[in-house]
Amino acid sequence: MTSSSENVVENMIEAVLVGGPSDLPATVRTQRLPRDGEKVKIHHRGGYEHFERDGGSSTSSPSPVVFRWTTRTRVAE
């Protein structure tokens, strides 16, 4: 029998965020994300950096899934 925490871990992938601002911290560029996730939004410098899954990345591969930077939006004030 598997626990719910094991199921959560099985449904996560290693992801690497590529592109975007050069000052985005390296610690943010590697993430554990849901296996079925297509987009990532990172809060950075008063806005959000948006990344989308690279179409060539496979979730079954042991290597990280690539998410490429697409745009930046500002936080609404």
Image: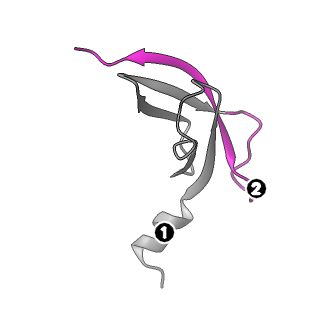
Q: Residue furthest front?
A: 23
Q: Of callouts 1 and 2, which one flags the residue occurring earlier in the amino acid sequence?
A: 1
Number of the front mark, 1 or 2: 2
At horizontal 54% and vertical 29% (from top left) the residue drawn is 23
Locate residue 32, reporting x and y percent.
53, 53
Q: Residue furthest bottom?
A: 1
State the residue in front, 18 or 24. Answer: 24
Locate residue 14, reporting x and y percent.
62, 54
Instruction: Sort mark 1 into few (<14), some (14-19) or many (20+) by Cα contacts within 10 Å.
Output: few
The amino acid on which the numbered mark 1 sits, given as a three-letter code, is Asn
The amino acid on which the numbered mark 2 sits, given as a three-letter code, is Ser
Say whether residue 16 is left or right of residue 12: right
Secondary element at image label 1: helix
Q: Measured along the vertical axis of the image, is residue 54 above or below residue 11? A: above
Q: Is residue 68 magenta?
A: yes
Q: Which mark is residue 61?
A: 2
At horizontal 57% and vertical 51% (from top left) the residue drawn is 35
CA distance for labels 1 and 2: 18 Å
State the residue in front, 37 or 72. Answer: 72
Q: Which mark is residue 7?
A: 1
Residue segment shown in magenta: 54-77
